[in-house]
């Protein structure tokens, strides 16, 4: 919960906005911005990217991660399925559910899941 709240404090054009962290029926959930688009896992199946597109996507991912790292937040689950590109070519980093606050206690172990129900936009899952 601490990591999710920290991620919710992020405000960057390349990071999916987290609106609320709450509980219902004994399940904790994260309500996020709806992001229309395709995740990179799906887009990569349709063929290679151009060099310019690859560099632009990589720069945007780096910009979003740098903003998170400046706030002491480490994503811990960067993969093509967690990067969405909108129809307007805006890159959004999704799913901070496994995020860790640098220097803080590690509340989830890699590969174990985080116990949160993620309510996300179409491209994210």
Image (cartoon, grey):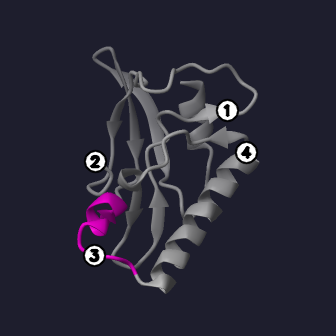
- Label 4 Cα neighbours within 10 Å, binned few <14 / some 14-19 / many ≥20: some
> Can residue 65 be seen at all in this image of the molecule?
yes
| Residue 100: in magenta span | no
Please tell me which of labels 3 and 1 falls first in the chain. Answer: 3
Q: Which residue is mark 1?
A: 101
Q: Which residues are magenta?
A: 37-49
Q: Which residue is mark 4?
A: 71
Dot 1 and dot 4 residues touching (CB under 8 Å)? no
For the point 55% across and 62% down, the residue is 61
Please tell me which of labels 1 and 4 falls first in the chain. Answer: 4
Q: Which residue is mark 3?
A: 47
For the point 46% across and 35% down, the residue is 97
> Can residue 36 be seen at all in this image of the molecule?
no
Callout 4: SS: loop
Dot 3 and dot 2 residues touching (CB under 8 Å)? no
Q: Compute the Cα span from label 4 to label 3.
A: 35 Å
Callout 1: SS: strand
Callout 2: SS: loop
Mark 4 or mark 3: which is in front? 3
Q: Compute the Cα span from label 2 to label 4.
A: 26 Å
Query: Which of the numbered marks, if any, corresponds to residue 125?
Result: 2
Mark 3 or mark 1: which is in front? 3
Q: Compute the Cα span from label 3 to label 2.
A: 20 Å
Dot 1 and dot 2 residues touching (CB under 8 Å)? no
Q: Where residue 36 sits: x, y (%)? A: 31, 65
């Amino acid at each position: 919960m601490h990591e999710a709240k920290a991620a919710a404090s992020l405000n960057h054009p390349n990071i999916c906005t987290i609106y609320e962290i709450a509980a219902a029926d004994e399940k904790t959930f994260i309500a996020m911005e709806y992001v229309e688009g395709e995740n990179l896992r799906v887009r990569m199946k349709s063929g290679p990217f151009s060099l310019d597109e690859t560099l632009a996507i990589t720069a945007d991912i780096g910009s979003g991660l740098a903003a998170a790292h400046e706030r002491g937040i480490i994503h811990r689950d960067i993969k093509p399925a967690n990067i969405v590109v909108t129809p307007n070519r805006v890159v959004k980093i999704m799913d901070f559910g496994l995020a860790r606050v640098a220097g803080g206690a590690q509340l989830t172990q890699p590969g174990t899941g985080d116990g949160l129900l993620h309510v996300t936009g179409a491209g994210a899952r």
